[in-house]
Image (cartoon, rainbow, N blue to C red):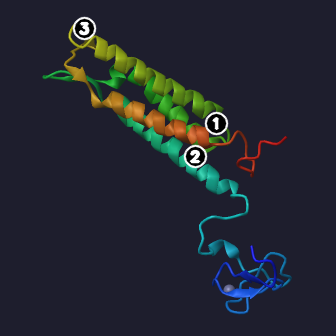
């Protein structure tokens, strides 16, 4: 910090007087300037000192949840167990559950601001995916899964699990409510 006299303009990086409300080089207006405020949010730096608008934050959360939901849905329809001759899609087994969970997750991500429903749907999808992965893996050579003599685990299971992990990231990122402050939990 300079002890006195000057500060650096955040727009043009020129040194100007510390008491200046307007940069004499580029016209940047500092907070507290009485004249019409020129929007500082298009400033070069991407880091804003002001609280992040809720829309931006929720957009990221929602994007992760929606992307995860799409992956879970695709994985639910994809093969969960494959043999040399045929494959069983997830929807002939527990994929029905994960498909429904994906729909709930996607709807909750868009329609609600909270994360309870989306979180539960994510846990269901991920839990079923992981459970079935272990289950299918264990029964590889001995038992059929949904009528298919299993040769190996189908890619659908992996996609479901990956989708659930991505959605979980969105769920954990989302705040409990439409609050503006991100870190402050109050005290
Ligand atoms: Zn300037």
In this view of the protein, can residue 106 be seen by the observer?
A: no
Residue extending farthest to the front is 3
Q: Which mark is residue 176?
A: none
Q: Residues within 10 Å of mark 2 (few under 14, many from 20)?
A: many
Nearer-N-terminus badge (3/2):
2
Q: Assess whether mark 2 and mark 3 are in contact (beta carbons under 8 angstroms).
A: no
Q: Residue at x 59, y 52 (%)?
A: 59
Q: Residue at x 76, y 84 (%)?
A: 6
Give the answer, above or below, for where 147 lies relative to 59: above
Specify the quadrant of the image occupied by residue 98.
top left
Q: Assess whether mark 1 and mark 2 are in contact (beta carbons under 8 angstroms).
A: yes
Give the SS element for disc 3: loop
| 96 sits left or right of 10 in the view | left
Q: Residue at x 73, y 63 (%)?
A: 50
Could you say where residue 171 lies in the image, as x and y percent from the top left? 58, 38
* Distance from the alpha carbon under mark 2 to that under mark 1: 10 Å
* Distance from the alpha carbon under mark 3 to that under mark 2: 40 Å
């Amino acid at each position: 910090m300079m002890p006195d006299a000057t500060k650096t303009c955040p727009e043009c990086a020129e040194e100007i007087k510390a008491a200046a409300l307007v940069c004499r080089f580029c016209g940047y207006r500092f907070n507290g300037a009485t004249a019409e405020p020129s929007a500082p949010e298009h400033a070069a730096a991407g880091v804003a000192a002001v609280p992040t608008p809720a829309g931006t934050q929720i957009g990221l959360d929602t994007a992760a949840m929606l992307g995860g939901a799409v992956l879970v849905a695709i994985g639910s329809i994809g093969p969960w167990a494959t043999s040399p001759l045929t494959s069983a899609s997830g929807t002939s087994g527990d994929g029905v559950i994960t498909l429904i969970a994906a729909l709930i997750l996607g709807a909750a991500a868009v329609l609600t601001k909270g994360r309870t429903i989306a979180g539960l749907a994510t846990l269901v999808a991920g839990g079923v995916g992981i459970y079935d992965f272990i289950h299918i893996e264990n029964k590889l050579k001995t038992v059929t899964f949904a009528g298919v003599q299993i040769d190996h685990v189908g890619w659908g299971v992996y996609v479901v699990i990956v989708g659930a992990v991505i959605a979980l990231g969105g769920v954990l990122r989302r705040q409990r409510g439409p609050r503006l402050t991100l870190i402050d939990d109050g005290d």
